[in-house]
Amino acid sequence: MPYCAEADLILAYNTETILSMSREENDNGAIDSDKITAVCAEASALADDYLQSGSITTPFTETWASLKSRCIDVSVYFLARQEGAMRDDILTRYEQAIAWLELVAEGGVKAPLSTVGDIAASNQDLAMTQTQFDKRVKLW
């Protein structure tokens, strides 16, 4: 189960941006939903790989908000790369998402166990580790 979907990408980046990177082959002006589904699945699989490297059991049955956000950024990066439409902000958000996944895998951010209660508790842990994450991103 992907951690993000087409509607999430549109909310995070806007319809125009996603449309420009995912038009159907017949150029009828519509978003290519199959392409979006594929990059969301690819981004989610990449996230699972990082998390599993840190001995975290995946996939999650509930989507963790922070994980969803990072998967959106990775998905948009994959779209931009496929379409030759890379922008600095997309690359930066991708790099930050990967740094965050590495931090989670290393135990710097506590991952939830997949229940709503666990997600809420984990979000409290995120607030405490934001400074740690910010310092790591600044190293780039």
Image (spheres, grey):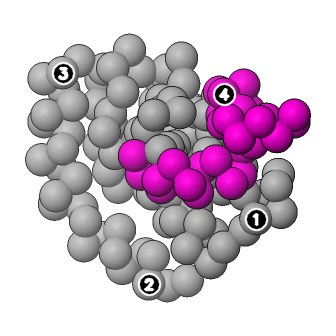
Q: Residues within 10 Å of mark 3 (few under 14, many from 20)?
A: some
48 to the left or right of 130: right
Q: CA distance from mark 4 to mark 2?
A: 35 Å
Say which quadrant the N terminus sits in: top right
Could you say whether the residue bearing mark 1 is in a helix, strand or loop? loop
Q: Which residue is mark 2?
A: 138
Q: Which one is nearer the viewer's eye here, 79 or 55?
A: 79
Give the vertical position of 127 relative to 72 (above or below).
Answer: below
Label 3 near label 2: C-beta < 8 Å?
A: no
Upstream in sequence: badge 1 or badge 2: 1
Could you classify mark 1 by the number of other residues whose Cα lies within 10 Å: few (under 14), some (14-19), or many (20 or more)?
Answer: few
Q: Position of residue 134 (x, y in %)?
A: 34, 75
N-terminal label among 1 and 4: 4
Q: Earlier in the sequence, mark 2 or mark 3?
A: 3
34 to 36, vertically: above or below? above
The kind of residue tagged 3 is Val
Is 65 a magenta residue? no
Taking the image as shown, residue 25 lies to the left or right of residue 85, namely right
The numbered disc on residue 85 is: 1
Circle 1 or circle 3, nearest the eye: 1
Label 1 is placed on what type of residue?
Ala
Report helix, strand or loop for mark 4.
Answer: helix
**Residue linked to disc 4:** 33
Q: Amino acid at mark 4?
A: Ser
Chain part drawn in magenta = 11-37
Q: Earlier in the sequence, mark 1 or mark 3?
A: 1
Q: Where on the picture, by quarter, is residue 28?
A: top right
Real-space Cα distance between discs 1 and 4? Answer: 18 Å
Q: Is residue 62 visible?
A: yes
Badge 3 marks a residue whose secondary structure is helix
- Give residue 123's position: percent from left, percent from top: 18, 44
Q: Quadrant of residue 41?
A: top right
